[in-house]
Amino acid sequence: MVVFCSGGIALKRKENICSAATRVHCSSAQSSPPPAWPGRAVSEPGRKTWDGPKPISIVGSTGSIGTQTLDIVAENPDKFRVVALAAGSNIVLLADQIRTFKPQLVSIRDESLIDELKEAIADVEHKPEIIPGDQGIIEVARHPDAVTVVTGIVGCAGLKPTVAAIEAGKDIALANKETLIAGGPFVLPLAHKHNVKILPADSEHSAIFQCIQGLPEGALRRVILTASGGAFRDLPVEKLKEVKVADALKHPNWNMGKKITVDSATLFNKGLEVIEAHYLFGAEYDDIEIVIHPQSIIHSMIETQDSSVLAQLGWPDMRIPILYTLSWPDRIYCSEITWPRLDLCKLGSLTFKKPDNVKYPSMDLAYAAGRAGGTMTGVLSAANEKAVEMFIDEKISYLDIFKVVELTCDKHRAELVTSPSLEEIVHYDLWARDYASNIRPSVGLTPVLV
């Protein structure tokens, strides 16, 4: 596998990065950013600063995370209220959200759609202020009345509004992976400076977060991330060279977007979650493991110093982790009608198996990038996003996804920045996408630049 290290260490192959003799630590404790949660979660007394329903802003209100967050608000109007919404270009849905939730401020990314939005809400009695473009998204993120900001925008586009929210002292309900995978070295020190809480809204990190509640200092020993295994979990590795886009999009458990479904098949989603877990909980990479759990009922686990293993279980439903980011440290009652309760007897059995590093080279790539730190993790994520796009467009084969990512990370070694600024993070995100897009496999499946 590849090992990307800071400090000028050359790219090289290692058979087993986890063995004591070959283990590589590329970042020192002094250069690593402080984790969002140092292996434990303790509520601060007297932190509450609002009366009545908790005021929230949503960045990406018409996307999957945004609409599920609004489902929660609709079911719990006595617990939450919406003060600001930022959307992309779905005017019809945004207008409906304005009618239902009555925000004070909304943003639409495309300024040319303002007149259409105004016409769509002409019958609304209390019209919100409308600010278009990137500045509007930032204003939604730092709305003075908001206590928590839900960050549901995909990609590095979510970085600047998240930074604006942190600088304004808002807690972050984190659904944007790039915030930590690419921006961790910059975002985490900023969050500590402003005493802001970063609360994970994805199911795996929410599970870990729930499991570390009340742990004493130093109690966390290991993080165990569960993975469905994706479309090819039961396919022999030698068959992977034959798979097509349609095959990769057949997730055995549920229907998702194309990108995340391919990431589930390659296990890049889990590799990226390893990096995010490191930044969130301060676990060393040697202490973060991945296991295949086909039923997707255990969302992740932790092991404590005394070898006890704690797990969070539930039916796959993104609303549960989103709800916990909004309600923490409280627990809110959910009706059985809209929030089905887990029935273990009906479920029957839970199974696990070790992931195959040969089938999933993404794991080695992600661990190596994580150990390199700095801008390498953002480059890994951006290169993967571009490679998946190329695969879906049938420009490269399935196995070439891994090769495109590896070559892009390899090229970045010479310019790795261990403590990047926000501008450098965004720059290398764009660079990685551009570089990856120019890689094409030759007939012999050896990637070459064109």
Image: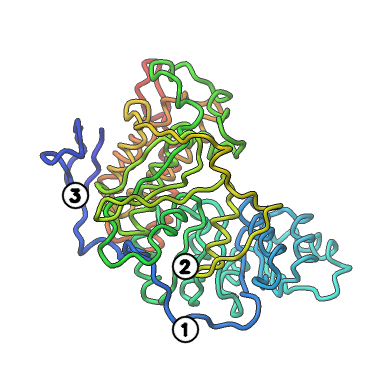
Instruction: Locate the N terminus by quadrant.
Output: top left
In the rendered image, residue 123, in percent from the top left (x then y), is placed at: 89, 68
How far apart are labels 1 and 3 at the CA level?
39 Å
Residue sitting at x 39%, y 71% = 42
Give the answer, above or below, for where 38 lies relative to 306: below
Circle 3 sits on which residue? 25
Residue contact between numbered discs 3 and 2, judged by CB atoms under 8 Å: no
Occupied quadrant, residue 278? bottom left
Amino acid type at circle 2 is: Val
How far apart are labels 3 and 2 at the CA level?
29 Å
Mark 1 or mark 2: name the one nearer the start of the chain.
1
The outermost residue toward the right is: 123
Amino acid type at circle 1 is: Gly
Count numbered badges in the picture: 3
Callout 3 environment at 10 Å: few (<14), some (14 to 19), or many (20+)? some
47 on left or right of 302: right
Which label sits in the foreground, 1 or 3? 1
Which label sits in the foreground, 1 or 2? 1
Circle 2 sits on which residue? 163
Front residue of 312/239: it is 312
Q: Which mark is residue 46?
A: 1
Residue sitting at x 55%, y 68% = 327
In the rendered image, residue 433, in percent from the top left (x then y), is placed at: 45, 43
Amino acid type at circle 3 is: His
The outermost residue toward the front is: 345
Which label sits in the foreground, 3 or 2? 3
In the rendered image, residue 62, in percent from the top left (x then y), is placed at: 68, 55
Q: Which mark is residue 178?
A: none
